[in-house]
Image (spheres, helix red, strand yellow):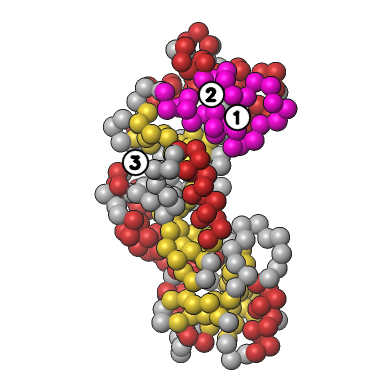
Amino acid sequence: MIIARKLGWFLVAFLLSVIFCPRDLLPPAYAQSARDPVPTAPAISAAVLRKHMIPALKTLPKVRAVKVIDEMTLDLEIEGGRTVTVGLANLLDNLNRDPGERERYLTEALGLIISIIDKPSAGHQVTREQFAAALVPVIKNTEYRAAFDATVAQTSGKGAPPLLYRPIAGDVILVVGLDEAKGPQILQSGRGKPFALSDEEMFEQATRNLAQRVTSLRVVAMGPLRMIEFDPNYNASLLAVDAVWASIAPEGEDDLIVAVPARDTLAYTSVKDKEAVEALREFAALPNLPYAITTELLCRKDKGWVVFK
């Protein structure tokens, strides 16, 4: 089970290779779904596994909808307002490690999911307050948005809710996630409806949550630049917290220029320091960074951000 930092009881991610469920305990439709798409391929990708699992999951009793959260995570909307999150990473590893046992692993996976849906525990329920407390703002880019929406449309249909986002500046966007130990789970538009939260309220709550966590910042000198160290998952997310920039430049925020080449990297300098600005441009262009965001520089303006030319 994937344990989330604040919402582990809500995100029920399965160790899909652990519990055995014999084939004859599954209705025929489930058994057929478990056999169909992936019997002989030399290797199975996450996309192929999702394409197989989604139709099978949609046939399960009490499942009202299946949503793609990311390439390894699916959300099942269950009758009564419950959400069950299915993690596919362990199943995919087992299918590729032991191709001769693929049918058994797939059957076991569906059997485990059925047992959890049919026997929910109180731990699967979440209140509005608990859901809201786990929201966090995350910085992404327009390329991520396009890939996210394409994946959702391919696996859940063209009518599926798109990525919940708002533009920041240039190709930089702000999205909302659920805070998890392995990194934020990015949410689609409308995800807050079961908890009476609009998309706008989710943005506001996420930003407020992060602001409350920023009790102190570590600023490290790197030549003429300054690096902000807070949390590797949320360093870039500090772009959304106005109080951070007010504290860094109490005499005037509009002199600040920042680089956010990746999720864990945030550097800034003053627009008045030409040498530092050039160093910041080089820093923003660092190649091959995980969770890359943008090579553009952003300038603080009127409590927001614009692209610095």
In space, the residues marked 3 and 2 are separated at their CA atoms by: 24 Å
x then y, percent, for residue 242: 42, 74
Tag 1's secondary structure?
helix
Mark 1 touches mark 2? (CB < 8 Å): yes
Instruction: Answer with mark 3 or mark 2, whichever residue precedes in sequence.
Output: 2
For mark 1, what is the residue?
Answer: 91
Q: CA distance from mark 1 to mark 2?
A: 8 Å
Q: Is residue 201 magenta?
A: no
Q: Amino acid at mark 3?
A: Val
Q: Extreme front residue here?
A: 158
Q: Secondary structure at mark 2?
A: helix
- Dot 2 corresponds to which residue? 109
Quadrant showing the C terminus: bottom right
Q: Tell me where residue 117 appears, x and y as whole percent.
A: 39, 25
Name the residue located 59 percent from the left edge and 37 percent from the top edge: 47
Q: Position of residue 172 (x, y in %)?
A: 52, 66
The residues colored magenta run 33-59
Residue lying at 26% horizontally and 49% vertically, measured from the top left = 196
Counting other residues with Cα less than 10 Å from the Cα at mark 1, is it few (<14), some (14-19), or many (20 or more)? many
* Horizontal side of residue 76 vs 299, given as left or right: left
Residue 161 against residue 275 in the figure, above or below: above
Residue 134 appears in the rendering: no
